[in-house]
Image: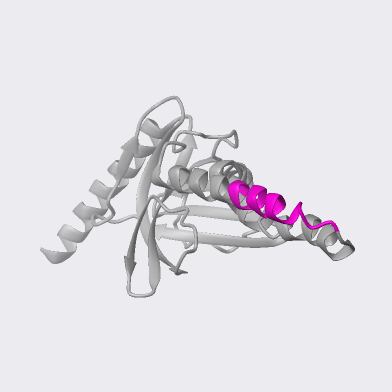
Amino acid sequence: MAALTGWDGILDDGEEILWQGAPDDGLDFGSFWSVQTVSAVFFAGFSLFWMAMAFHITSGMKDGFGQVLNIVFPLFGLPFFGAGVYMLLGRFWAEARLRRNSHYTLTNRAAYIGLDAKGKRSLERYAIGPDMRLTLEDGDLGAVWFASKVNTMPRRAPSMGRSRARIGGATFSTQTIGFERIANARAVYAMMRKLQIERAEIEGDKDA
């Protein structure tokens, strides 16, 4: 029971595990061509331009203070350049590392996503019901999406979500949640659809 190891007592009475797995932890550049990539290129490019101009302007200062300024002043652009490089490429390594520490479990009642990283553990439970919106992303490494959440970020913060909107002084990022980059996505989707139908029939009998 890899995905729920150490989570004794988590499952309800009568809850049974139907499937367990983990996302592929390889680098996924499928979302490389995006608005975020364009922003990252502009951000990193402008930082390089700023550092080059700062170095050029201060290179003519020959006194001791000018020589120090010639070294230090351009370095102020490094944090912005680093942020641009992260937005461009580093985010893919961060996402792969997150998947490497993630585990999935499907029971006859809910979908679980466990995370064990940096000494901290978390387990999210998503009850399966008729109202759960299932989306199958088919392929050798597919996905089954079944939930979403909205994250609030300060203005100008980079968004890692699939979509985002700005309202007032904050950026709202919509994050899609599910079993991603799994080899048997179609089979898992079929199991979840069957559970939905069974749950709908049970609730229909209760209402009758």
Which residue is found at the position 62% from the left and 59% from the top? 7
Query: With 171 as the anchor, is 120 left or right in this view?
Result: right
* Direction left: furthest residue: 208
Which residue is found at the position 51% from the left and 43% from the top? 41
Confirm whether residue 1 shows in the render.
no
Pinpoint residue 38: horizontal percent, then vertical percent. 44, 43
Residue 114 image-quadrant placement: bottom right
Q: Is-magenta flag for residue 50?
A: yes
Pinpoint residue 160: horizontal percent, then vertical percent. 47, 53
Residue 69 image-quadrant placement: bottom right
Query: With 162 as the anchor, is 24 left or right in this view?
Result: right
Q: Is-magenta flag for residue 39?
A: no
Which residue is found at the position 18% from the left and 64% from the top? 206
- Our reading of the magenta stretch's main secondary structure is helix
* Direction right: furthest residue: 64
Which residue is nearer to you in this view: 175 or 110? 175
Pinpoint residue 31: horizontal percent, then vertical percent. 44, 38
Which residue is found at the position 62% from the left and 42% from the top? 93
Which residue is nearer to you in this view: 63 or 133? 63
Query: With 24 as the anchor, is 58 left or right in this view?
Result: right
Q: How is the image coloured?
A: one colour
Residue span colored magenta: 48-62
Q: Where's the C terminus, which quadrant? A: bottom left
Query: With 7 as the anchor, is 73 left or right in this view?
Result: right
Confirm whether residue 12 shows in the render.
yes
Figure label count:
0
Pinpoint residue 185: horizontal percent, then vertical percent. 41, 34
* Direction top: furthest residue: 140
Which residue is nearer to you in this view: 16 or 128? 128
